[in-house]
Amino acid sequence: MKVLVIGKGGREHALCWKLKQSKRATTIYCAPGNAGTAIDVLNVPIEAEDLRGLVQFAKREDVGLTLVGPEAPLVKGLVDAFQREGLKIFGPKREAAEIEGSKVFAKELMRQAGIPTAEYRVFHSSPDAENYVLSREVALLVRSRGRSTLRHTLHCRTAGETLEAVDRIMDPREMMSPGVQVEIEERGRKRVFSAREEARDFVLGRPLGLVIKADGLAGGKGVYVCDNLRQALEAIDQIMFRRVFGQAGDRVLIEERLDGREVSVLAITDGRTIIPLETCQDHKRAFDHDEGPNTGGMGAFSPSNTIEPAMMEQIEREVLVPTIHALKRARRPFRGVLYAGIMLTNQGPKVLEFNARFGDPETQVLVMRLKSDLLDLLEAAADERLSTAEVEWDPRPAVTVVMAAAGYPGAYERDRSILNIEAAERIEGVKVFHAGTRLRGDSTRPREARIVTDGGRVLNVTALGDTLEQAQAKAYEAARTISFEGAWYRRDIGNPPRDQPRPPPP
Ligand code: AMP
Ligand code: GLY
């Protein structure tokens, strides 16, 4: 069978590599692919969102099964387009992919189905969203000092009321004498401000736990976890006023901020049967010890040491099963990979987000551990006979370390030559998946062409080991072997969170 994989990242290279091991796969195409897929399989120069081009190619080449990596083509209706032409494809149709494409849709579905998630409100305009943020309780006392016309203490319940009180006391039109000051008391502690802006600044810096999210797809960047009012107002401004994500910011969600450990749970489903994949976890923040900005993921490991089997069962029961059923009831049956980002809170697991696809870089560690034939599994899901499928896993842990380009996650450099990938792969148990790479030179001879960087996350250096420590050690040894100008990576991929001791080796 000819197989087509759509996308060009590390996830797609990993899927191509695994599909190539299937006895039933004759040719594997990747559209548009990267240098790694050019070397391991065959690249096709069609972009992932060129729906018509992909359909035409699949028909012309008689592709037996297509697999979609990224979310954008799913949300655009690629699966619908393939199915209209009678082409077999793995992934959810447009209406089911809304669970990732619209956070508002996902939240409403969860609310209706009683699936645990953070409390939230939806807003259609920035003034409404700002007013809501300003209506949050801050409980401050505001007094005037000096010769103000306001003599009494103002008990301000909300941030908005406090800002108003500051403005009234320090209103330049009302200030009779220049010596007026404002005193703000917070839980017994008093501060005195002589300038209005300083007082406002103090109020805006009050801690608050809110998360502001753009409704639509924003390439993983549409979520702002805010520590204070200023950040929350800034997030609303970015999304709704400056419209940095375009239409994706037509609506915003404001959510209560959850605390706990984060886990990713992925499951393959045909809309009826659900097969959860092995546990895994990614590291989203850019720098060691989970510091710095959020990224698409700087590494991953599997199995996750934070999910006990009982917790996994609870997540299946309380999240995966009711979600698949709710989508079915809504006449949006979901077929493909459902990926739940979950926070393990004191009140149990709560959903942070859903994705309608394989995770990146979670897939890179999962395929290393998958022993079963991936093509059989995907085809069974596409044919709605997943109940007959069996999945076998390698018990050994896997780790993937993302090697990034200088500047990532900000603006980064491209076109740096990458050296020693083959040497790294000679380390037993190591596979280097390409993410942001491309070939320079004669593309008809991929093995001889030069490999250069072409993205922020460049390589996913992946290793299996007998223990997590061994997998880590191998992945890092391989990463040290590879070089390109400006290369950097986190040094703590696979380490447990700092508040959690490392479990003893089995
Ligand atoms: P999302 O794209 O919704 O997964 O959000 C990206 C990241 O933001 C998540 O991986 C979490 O780290 C964080 N996040 C999202 N929602 C919340 C929330 N309600 N509370 C705390 N953190 C959150
Ligand atoms: N690793 C996060 C994601 O795939 O969305």
Image: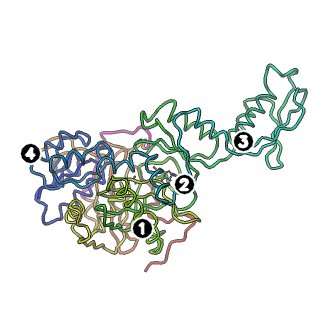
Residue 446 location (% of width, % of height): 16, 48
Q: Secondary structure at mark 1?
A: helix
Q: Nearer the viewer, mark 4 or mark 3?
A: 3
Q: Secondary structure at mark 4?
A: helix
Residue 293 location (% of width, % of height): 50, 46
Q: Nearer the viewer, mark 1 or mark 4?
A: 1
Mark 1 / mark 4, whichever is N-terminal: 4
Residue placed under numbered mark 1 in the picture: 316
Residue placed under numbered mark 4 in the picture: 60
Q: Say what amino acid the circle numbered 1 marks.
A: Glu
The residue sitting at the bottom extreme is 506
Q: For ligand 1, tell me if the residue under mark 2 lies within 8 Å.
A: yes
Q: Say what amino acid the circle numbered 3 marks.
A: Thr
Q: Quadrant of residue 11?
A: bottom left
Residue placed under numbered mark 3 in the picture: 158
Camera sees residue 203: yes
Q: What distance separates the C-alpha of mark 3 from that of mark 1? A: 40 Å
Residue placed under numbered mark 2 in the picture: 118
Q: What distance separates the C-alpha of mark 3 from that of mark 2? A: 22 Å
The segment highlighted magenta reads 409-422
Q: Quadrant of residue 274?
A: bottom left
